[in-house]
Image: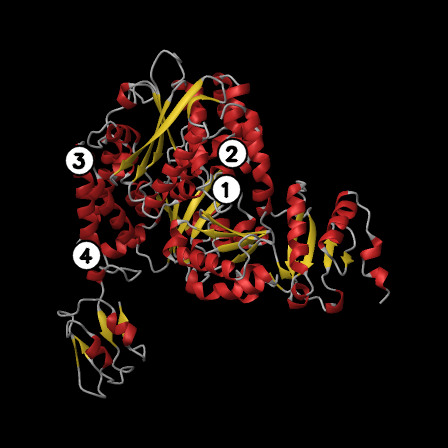
């Protein structure tokens, strides 16, 4: 029996900041102190505070150590685990107060969060099915198979108001109902979309890494509801930890008889296989994803017929996103009313966001629908670093748009985001400060969609390319005001005529920045100026003669030999040679170099 | 897995383990002094006995933790019992056997074992 559990994060964020080495050192020290029978080391999934990784939590005291280094381990083991004295110096400072260590749930980062999909992430060992069962895992599947009819299951999901967490927000129960006809007579499939492709999004990855069994359990429930016996999880090959843990989870579930034949003696059979995607963004689109599982090149096909009618291998199929599945077992156990009591009128429950960009607490947060952007950024996210001003937040990745500061108090849900020209997307939330150029951001996302367009339909293949070229022209100061109007027109063409969601949403970054930051576009076109100082072609670097002391440091640093001048005399930059790399600004100790 | 009972059995076995990781302010806290003085006078077996017994008896609302030296080194091993909304009770000169007595009398039945408390020592 262990008296203490030390949880150490094995998610991607903490692994990259060295949690594996810390864990190894921890085990070694615990052995050295003879505590291996008293203290258990548990490698968990993501706890959300990725910015402060590696993260380590000691229970039962629930003390969180942040940015733990292997060198700190001997002290923590001897002082805390052996002698019971918390090493306050290394504790997450938000929890340290005059009265001692306060609860994690009272910190700004966790206070307003409500973890349903992330319930077990960072709490259990994802490679041990018994830990999942210990927190109530597979009870929902048991309940469904022994007490409920398939139609009752679908009704519960419908009543809960759960909508797809992958982006479009289609009601999950409705999707299941469409695929539920003719049970038992037709082969059907249940698929999980784990092809998370938005730049800056890592919610699904964290669920798969931290709590893989919840996805398996929910897929089995879905299989029972529609009458399918086979499931596929389509996951990116670039998520090696997620793939590994899914493999372990599937093997363990089969071993315990929670996948396979006659589950819980109910006569229901269900099994799951993995399919790895090669990383094409378009394969996150449902029809392209299924085409890829079938073994063909990942290209979308027109709908209808919808997957619920003719999906994978032309059989009725339901496809849900990882986070959607992660909500299902809790809805079954706690009832649809419980789930529907959270959120807004049309968006129920919670949503996981991956916070990134110019924000203090980069990481994962799960908040009730209807929370404002201001709460997420200023309270949970800890605000913008370096005293900079908030400019906009980008949601929905390349399919979404930018939310400007004026809209910060809009409650976030599916419909409100669409109304302000963005979308929920899978939940990436990139925060931008005043140093971000909105033209440059639009260009960045368009470059991404040009790359990722599969080329099957013309509006997307050629339209996005032309759109990108216009943005490029504007960022180089060669655009005209007519270009802005033409761009807008082209955006609508692409939106209306593209085959799949990729093309239909690709112009969103352009449209939303044009809508809220048109003045920045105009500055690029008319004044040939980039207000944020990002677009290189519109910048000139200058040395202020009255501030320059002639120390020659800049001239020595310049990789293009563009700076000339004599010692102790003001230097000059030759604009023809200047690469605008900014190396001189960083070196100058007198603030004599400016970019305008 | 052929029945819900099997699942329930695993859950109950694991609950004591995973339950350790919840933060519940309604829990009774049992704190064992584990500074040098405590360890020297035998706090380790007291601590491990308490942990084992609490888990064996599935007392899910009790968490056993350690603390440092509270300054009464001559009375170590010291065990403090903190129940929500009640005064702290300090037991002194504990042994594994006395600890089990405290567990059975105090933690399960709610009767303070006066003879082992600090008050009985007449400071």
A311 displayed left or right of A142: left
Q: Which mark is residue B1?
A: none
Q: Are marks 3 and 1 on the same chain?
A: yes
Which SS class for mark 4? loop
Residue A158 vs A511, above or below: the answer is above
Q: Residue at x 38, y 21 (%)?
A: A229
Disc 1 crowd rating (10 Å Cα; few below 14, some 14-19, many 20+) is many
Kindly identify which numbered label has been placed on residue A120. Answer: 1
Answer with mark 1 or mark 2, whichever residue precedes in sequence. 1
| Gap in angstroms between the C-alphas marked 3 and 4 | 27 Å
Q: Residue at x 55, y 28 (%)?
A: B6
Residues under numbered marks 1 and 2 in contact, where contact means CB atoms less than 8 Å apart = yes
> Which image quarter: residue A291?
top left
Of mark 3 and mark 4, the one earlier in the sequence is 3
Look at mark 4 in the image and give the residue it sits on: A476
Q: Mark 1 to mark 2: distance in Å? A: 10 Å
Question: Of residues A230 and A29, which is closer to you in this image?
Answer: A29
Eyeballing the image, is A57 above or below A261? below
Circle 2 sits in a helix, a strand or a loop, which is it? loop
Q: Are marks 1 and 2 on the same chain?
A: yes
Q: Write down the residue under mark 3.
A: A455
First reached walking from the N terminus: tag 3 or tag 1: 1
Label 2 belongs to which residue?
A137
Residue A591 point in image, percent of width and height: 32, 77
Counting labels gives 4
Q: Are both tags, 3 and 4, on one chain?
A: yes
Residues at discs 2 and 3 in contact (Cβ within 8 Å)? no
* Mark 3 secondary-structure assignment: loop
């Amino acid at each position: 029996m262990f008296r203490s559990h030390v949880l150490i994060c094995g998610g991607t964020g903490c692994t990259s900041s060295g949690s594996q080495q810390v864990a190894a050192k921890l085990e070694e020290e615990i052995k050295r102190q003879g505590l291996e029978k008293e203290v258990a080391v548990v490698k968990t999934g993501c706890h959300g505070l990725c910015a402060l990784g590696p993260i380590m939590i000691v229970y039962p005291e629930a003390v969180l150590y942040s940015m733990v280094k292997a060198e700190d381990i001997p002290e923590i083991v001897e002082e805390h685990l052996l002698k019971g004295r918390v090493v306050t110096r290394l504790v997450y400072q938000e929890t340290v107060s005059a009265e001692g260590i306060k609860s994690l749930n009272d910190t700004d980062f966790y206070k307003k969060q409500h973890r349903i999909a992330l319930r077990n992430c960072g709490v259990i060992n994802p490679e041990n099915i018994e830990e999942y069962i210990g927190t109530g895992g597979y009870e929902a599947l048991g309940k469904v198979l022994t007490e409920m009819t398939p139609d009752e299951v679908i009704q519960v999901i419908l009543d809960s108001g759960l909508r797809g967490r992958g982006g479009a927000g289609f009601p999950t129960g409705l999707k299941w109902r469409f695929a539920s006809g003719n049970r038992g007579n037709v082969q059907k499939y249940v698929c999980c979309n784990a092809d998370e492709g938005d730049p800056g999004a890592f919610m699904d990855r964290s669920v798969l890494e931290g709590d893989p069994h919840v996805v398996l359990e929910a897929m089995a429930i879905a299989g029972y509801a529609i009458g399918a016996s086979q499931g596929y999880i389509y996951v990116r090959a670039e998520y090696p930890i997620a793939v590994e843990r899914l493999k372990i989870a599937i093997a363990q579930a089969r071993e315990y008889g929670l996948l396979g034949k006659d589950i819980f003696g109910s006569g229901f059979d269900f099994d799951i296989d993995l399919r790895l995607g090669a990383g094409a963004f378009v394969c996150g689109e449902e029809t392209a994803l299924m085409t890829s599982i079938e073994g063909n090149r990942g290209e979308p096909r027109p709908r209808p017929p919808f997957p619920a009618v003719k999906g994978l291998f032309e059989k009725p199929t339901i496809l849900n996103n990882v986070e959607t599945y992660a909500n299902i077992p809790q809805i079954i156990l706690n009832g649809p009313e419980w789930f529907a009591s959270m959120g807004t009128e049309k968006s129920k429950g919670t949503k996981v966001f991956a916070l990134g960009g110019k924000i203090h607490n980069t990481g994962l947060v799960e908040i009730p629908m209807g929370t404002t952007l201001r709460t997420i950024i200023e309270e949970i996210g800890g605000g913008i670093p370096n005293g900079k001003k908030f400019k906009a937040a980008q949601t929905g990745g390349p399919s979404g748009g930018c939310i400007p500061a004026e809209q910060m108090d809009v409650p976030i849900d599916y419909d409100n985001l669409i109304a302000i020209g963005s979308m929920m997307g899978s939940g990436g939330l990139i925060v931008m400060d005043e140093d971000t150029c909105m033209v440059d951001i639009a260009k960045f996302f368009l470059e991404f969609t040009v790359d990722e367009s599969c080329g099957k339909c013309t509006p997307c293949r050629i339209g996005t390319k032309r759109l990108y070229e216009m943005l490029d022209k504007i960022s180089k100061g060669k655009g005209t005001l007519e270009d802005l109007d033409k761009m807008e027109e082209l955006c609508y063409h692409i939106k209306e005529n593209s085959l799949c969601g990729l093309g239909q949403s690709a112009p969103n970054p352009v449209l939303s920045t044009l809508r809220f930051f048109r003045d920045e576009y105009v500055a690029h076109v008319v004044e040939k100026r980039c207000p944020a100082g990002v677009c290189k072609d519109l910048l000139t670097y200058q040395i202020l003669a009255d501030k320059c002391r002639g120390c020659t440091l800049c001239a020595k640093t310049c990789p293009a030999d563009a700076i000339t001048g004599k010692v102790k005399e003001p230097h000059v930059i030759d604009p023809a040679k200047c690469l605008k790399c900014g190396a001189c600004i960083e070196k100058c100790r007198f603030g004599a170099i400016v970019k305008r | 897995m052929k029945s819900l009972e099997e699942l329930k059995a695993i859950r109950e076995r694991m609950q004591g383990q995973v339950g350790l990781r919840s933060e519940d302010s309604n829990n009774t806290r049992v704190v064992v002094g584990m500074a040098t003085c405590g360890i020297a006078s035998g706090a380790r077996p007291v601590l491990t006995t308490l942990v084992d017994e609490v888990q064996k008896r599935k007392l899910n609302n009790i968490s056993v933790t350690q603390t440092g030296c509270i300054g009464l080194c001559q009375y170590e091993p010291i065990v403090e019992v903190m129940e929500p909304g009640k005064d702290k009770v300090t037991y002194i000169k504990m042994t594994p056997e006395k600890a089990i007595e405290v567990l059975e009398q105090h933690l399960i039945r709610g009767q303070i074992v006066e003879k082992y408390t600090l008050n009985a020592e007449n400071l």
